[in-house]
Amino acid sequence: MLELGIKILLGYLLGSVNGSLLIGKFVGVDIRSVGSGNAGGTNALRTQGKWFAIGVMLIDVGKGFLPAWLLPSLGLPGVPIDPMISRTWLMLACGSASVVGHCYPVWFGFAGGKGAATTVGMLIAVAPALLLPGLAVFAGVLITTGFVGLATMTAVSALPIILWWQSGPIHAPTVIVLAFLALFIIYMHRTNIVRMSRGEESRMHKVMLFRRRPDGD
């Protein structure tokens, strides 16, 4: 249990290194004070431009990948490898801890992003075959509605369903963890849900297939 606790803590601390807030410190901007106020990639793109957003995405995806890929097999001083702990469960636990750290970063006052990019990084390590189906769902919702938040919630919700359909109970641990992560990310998007219900949510009109033309066109 010592290994489990230490490595989950390390996963959380790595996840707390928020890309938007870290890069923002170097360029003199607090991403939480502009745009939607969210310290995630979408707000970074909308308010700071593509190069800032690319840097953010690389950090946020990387910190989801690294804990899930590296920590389960990493030997730590004074922390022996526990043969009773499944390496699969440990990968999922460390990756999930990083997602939580991204959303509630200890280094930045527990105010972070919404977990999508870090979840992608975790998927690269634990279930890379889900990346293309997940991206297809995300893209399909985005180009039809223009809502990034809705596309994200739909894609993460589809992941455990797709994995169960592909492999059944063989990957039950991953299905279970992905289902809980989907609920967590939906919770993190609760303000988006409220804004959509009020008709106040921003759309990415440039990527939409069916855009309403301005009056008079």
Image (tube, grey):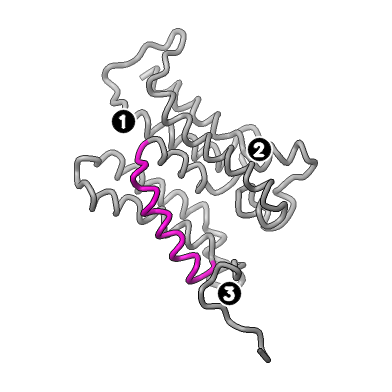
Which residue is found at the position 75% from the left and 37% from the top? 25
Left of 195 or right of it: where is 99? left
Residue 90 in percent (x, y) is at 36, 28
The residue range painted magenta reads 126-146
Q: Residue 199, labelled with which disc?
A: 3
Which residue is found at the position 39% from the left and 53% from the top? 134
- The amino acid marked with disc number 2 is Gly
Mark 1 to mark 2 CA distance (whole Å): 31 Å
Left of 67 or right of it: where is 207? right
Left of 176 or right of it: where is 38? right
- Position of residue 41 relative to residue 97, above or below, is below
- The amino acid marked with disc number 3 is Gly
- The amino acid marked with disc number 1 is Thr
Mark 1 to mark 3 CA distance (whole Å): 42 Å
In this rendering, the label closer to the viewer, 3 or 2: 3
- Badge 3 density bin: few <14, some 14–19, many ≥20, Cα 10 Å: few
Which residue is found at the position 58% from the left and 40% from the top? 58
Residue position marked by numbered label 2 in the rendering: 109
| Residue 127 within the magenta-colored segment of the rendering | yes
Q: Residue 88, labelled with which disc?
A: 1
Along the line of sight, which residue is nearer the eye, 11 or 206? 206
Along the line of sight, which residue is nearer the eye, 153 or 58? 58
